[in-house]
Image: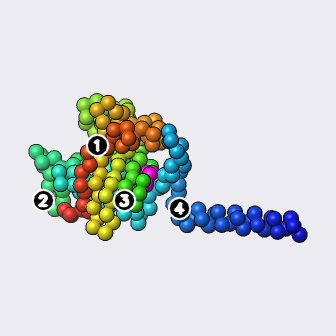
Amino acid sequence: MKKFIFSLRKTSALFVLVLFSVLLFGCKPVTEIQTETKIVILEKLTNDDPLVNDWYDTTVGRFLITKDYLSNQYLDLDGEFYDYDNDTYLWNKSYEGNNLYVLKLSETSGTIFIKYTRAADANWNYTTDPSQAPDIGKWYAVSYKDLNATNKTVNLSGAWKADGVTSCNTLEEAVNEFTIEKGYFEFYTAHIENPLE
C-alpha cells in the first residue's frame, strides 16, 4: 500500500510539473540556451504575438515580422519608390531571415534571433547568394523595446557596433554575442503599425 501511495504522489507531482510548464509557456515551442551567466528560454513566435506585424518607421524603413520570417526593407527616395499603376510602394529588401526565436526580457522588450536568408555582400549590396554574402545561413539579432500592443508601436534596433560581428555560426553563439551589455543595439528607431497601405 505504501508503494502505491508513493507512486501516486510521484505521478501527481509529475502531472503538476507538466501542468505548470504548459501554463507558463503555453503550447509554444521553447529552447533553452546556456549563456555566459545563466540559462535563458527562447520562444518561437505565434501569429497572435504582438511582435508579428508590418512595422514602419519615420525614416522610410520597414520591418515585416511574421511568426516564421523577418524582413528589413527601405524605400529608395532617390529612385522609383511608388508603383502608380498598382497603387503600391516599391520596397527594397535589405536583410531577411527565417527560423525566428525570441528571447523575451520583459513584457515589452527582448531580442529576435533570425537565420539569414538574405544578407550583405562585401560592397553592402543585399543578395540571397551565399557565395556572395557569407552571413547567409548564420544567425543575427534584432532588439526591441517599448512594445505597446494596444497602440501598435515598438522601438527596433538591428545588432551593430563598430568592432562587432555581423553574424554567428550558431544560435547559442548569437544569444551570447548580440547583447546590449556587449555594446550592440545602441540605436533604436520608433516603429508603428503599417500606416501606408
The boundaries of the magenta stretch are: 100-104
How far across and how far down the image is residue 61, in percent? 22, 51
- State the predominant SS element of the stretch in magenta: strand
For disc 1, the neighbor class at 10 Å (few under 14, some 14 to 19, many from 20) is few
Marks 2 and 1, how far apart in space? Answer: 37 Å
Precedes in sequence: disc 4 or disc 2: 4
SS state under label 3:
loop
Q: Earlier in the sequence, mark 3 or mark 1?
A: 3
State how far apart marks 4 and 3 are (Cα).
17 Å
Query: Which residue is labeled 1 in the image?
Result: 186
The mark that comes first in sequence, 1 or 4, is 4
Q: Please report whichever mark, 2 or 1, sits nearer to the chain's N-terminal start.
A: 2
**Mark 4 or mark 3, whichever is nearer to me:** 3
Residue drawn where x is 28% and y is 39% of the image: 126
Q: CA distance from mark 2 to mark 3?
A: 38 Å
The amino acid sitting under disc 4 is Phe
Q: Secondary structure at mark 2?
A: loop
Pointer 3: residues within 10 angstroms few (<14), some, or many (20+)? some
| Label 2 crowd (10 A; few <14 / some 14-19 / many >=20) | few
Q: Which mark is residue 25?
A: 4
Residue 65: which quarter of the image? bottom left
- What is the x, y in percent for residue 43? 48, 55
**In this image, 9 relative to 90: left or right?**
right
Report if residue 123 lies within the magenta region: no
Disc 2 or 3, which lies upstream in sequence? 2
Say which of marks 1 and 4 sits in front.
Answer: 1
Q: Establish if 98 lies above or below 194.
A: above
Helix, strand or loop for disc 1: loop
